[in-house]
Amino acid sequence: MLNQVGTGADERLERVDWQLVRDELNGTGAALLERLLMPKECREIAALYDDDSRFRSRIVMARHGFGQGEYKYFSYPLPGLIGDLRTALYPHLAPIANAWNERMGIDLRYPGKHRDFLELCHRSGQTRPTPLLLKYDAGDYNCLHQDLYGELAFPLQATILLSEPGRDFTGGEFVMTEQRPRMQSRAHVIRLAQGEAVVFAVHHRPVKGTRGTYRVNMRHGVSRLHSGQRKTLASSSTTRSSDRSGDAELLLNGPAQYLAHRIARQRQDTTHAGLEEFI
Ligand SMILES: [Fe+2]
């Protein structure tokens, strides 16, 4: 089923109320997409975790201080349904990402089609796929963090819960915090159903204040699992680089954009994006 032709990804996403998603993202930095995957599909994708031929690298989170648990990055070709969902999701999110960049004074704009965005990523030296499967056992957790995949990081990411809460695991809630200027941080706990996705801001989002728009810094993580096993599929539209060859091209695109990405790169030191182990 995962590799069949015609996975219906476009149709599934056309059923979504995108105005509501936009409003929720603007309001809290996160939005839910219900019943994106059927339970059988969730189980099939979760079962891929033990097939190392599907993945290009494996991260054991405790070794890097990321938390406790592990995840694996898919290699190309992606399983059909996962690739199709990534491609189908992108054109719905790109206008939101562009509107955010405009409000935050960031020059970068994302093209309307995922194929064109991937082309930009590849030209910047980001050629490796970023979809990944995460696995948490009892006692595991994921520290609050940001995912910044290279120079052309897409500001929104989707995570789909593959396991069934209450039956497969307890605890293990998706958590987001927003760090607001001159205010204390606020936490959101997002309860997902099996097959449901949360779309969320991976770095920051614009918020309208009394003196104009300001940036709120977003972090996400997973609270400690009380029992069982929890698997999720995380999908970003972005690819990531295997080297640092993107600098020259970004310089050609304009100093302001280059500066923005230099700042983003410096922040990468505090994210998961910097470390990998190959399986
Ligand atoms: Fe993450």
Image (tube, grey):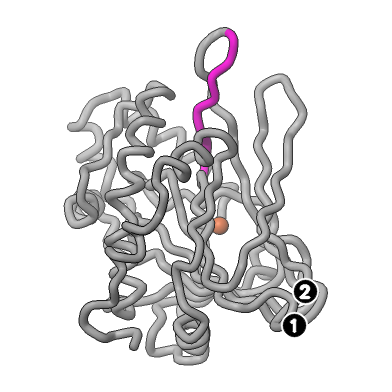
Per the model, the C-alpha gap separating discs 2 and 1 is: 7 Å
The amino acid marked with disc number 1 is Gly
- Which region is colored magenta? 203-210
Q: Is residue 210 left or right of residue 129?
A: right
Give above or below for 260 relative to 203. Answer: above
Name the foreground residue: 125 vs 28.
28
x then y, percent, for residue 133: 51, 74
Specify which label sits upstream in the sequence, 2 or 1: 2
Q: Residues within 10 Å of mark 2 (few under 14, many from 20)?
A: some
The amino acid marked with disc number 2 is Thr
At 73% from the left edge and 36% from the top edge, which residue is drawn?
Answer: 186
x then y, percent, for residue 275: 52, 62
Mark 1 CB in 8 Å range of ligand 1? no
Name the foreground residue: 77 vs 172.
172
**CB within 8 Å, label 2 to label 1:** yes
Give above or below for 181 relative to 79. Answer: above
Q: Is residue 231 left or right of residue 42?
A: right
x then y, percent, for residue 51: 45, 91
- Residue 265, picture quadrant: top left
- Name the residue tied to disc 2: 170
- Name the residue tied to disc 1: 228
Give above or below for 175 relative to 180. Answer: below
At 17% from the left edge and 51% from the top edge, which residue is drawn?
Answer: 116
At 41% from the left edge and 23% from the top edge, which residue is drawn?
Answer: 103
